[in-house]
């Protein structure tokens, strides 16, 4: 009986771990909402390309939905979720500063392609693919003022 009591005490603190959502994920979910205009894109080992303001390429995030706009047209839309994932270095084949890109965005409930994100101030950075295989993608977006 004493062992059963000890096991219960030892197990109890861990029983809630799976139910608690990271506050960092909630902060990222809240800060991603809005319209983001593409500022820079780098694909593979090619040099980064800068985009001028008003370039008609953007991402729009609402509470659970997104739109990808290229050249002024919606080319993709659906749902998204943000989750904590610290596997960025092994996925993108780069050394990433400690504590950065600790979350990823899952589009349309299809987790096969991992897209990591970092939001600082008014800048959204997306990182995906393996750069060592010339398949990496790095994009920087600037948050646009709301029109409300």
Image: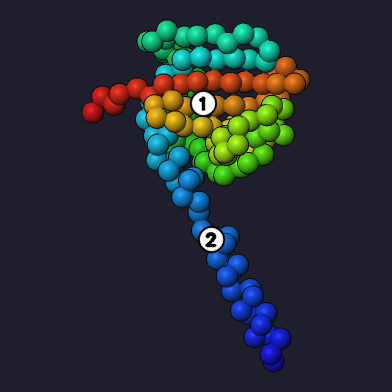
The x, y position of residue 6, in whole percent, is: 66, 82
Q: Residues within 10 Å of mark 1 (few under 14, many from 20)?
A: many
Q: Quadrant of the N terminus?
A: bottom right
User: SS class of the residue under badge 2?
Assistant: helix
Residue behind mark 2: 19
Residue at the (44%, 31%) spot, across then down = 120
Image height of 47 relative to 1, above or below: above
Image height of 20 relative to 102, above or below: below
3D distance between C-alphas at marks 2 and 1: 28 Å
Residue behind mark 1: 125
Residue at the (48%, 46%) spot, across then down = 24
Q: Residues within 10 Å of mark 2 (few under 14, many from 20)?
A: few
Q: Quadrant of residue 28?
A: top left
First in sequence: mark 2 vs mark 1: 2
The x, y position of residue 46, in whole percent, is: 65, 9
The x, y position of residue 54, in whole percent, is: 37, 10
Residue at the (40%, 36%) spot, across then down = 31
């Amino acid at each position: 009986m004493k062992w059963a009591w000890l096991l219960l005490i030892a197990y109890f603190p861990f029983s809630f771990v799976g139910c608690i959502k990271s506050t960092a994920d909630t902060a990222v979910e809240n800060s991603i909402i809005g319209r983001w205009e593409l500022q820079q894109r780098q694909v593979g080992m090619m040099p980064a390309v800068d985009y001028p303001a008003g370039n008609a390429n953007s991402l729009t995030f609402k509470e659970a939905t997104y739109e990808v706009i290229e050249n002024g047209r919606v080319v993709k839309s659906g749902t998204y979720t943000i989750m904590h994932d610290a596997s960025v270095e092994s996925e993108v084949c780069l050394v990433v500063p400690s504590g950065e890109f600790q979350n990823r965005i899952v589009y349309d409930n299809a987790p096969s392609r991992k897209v990591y994100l970092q939001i600082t101030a008014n800048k959204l950075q997306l990182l995906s693919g393996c750069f060592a295989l010339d398949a990496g993608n790095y994009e920087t977006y600037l948050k646009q003022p709301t029109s409300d």
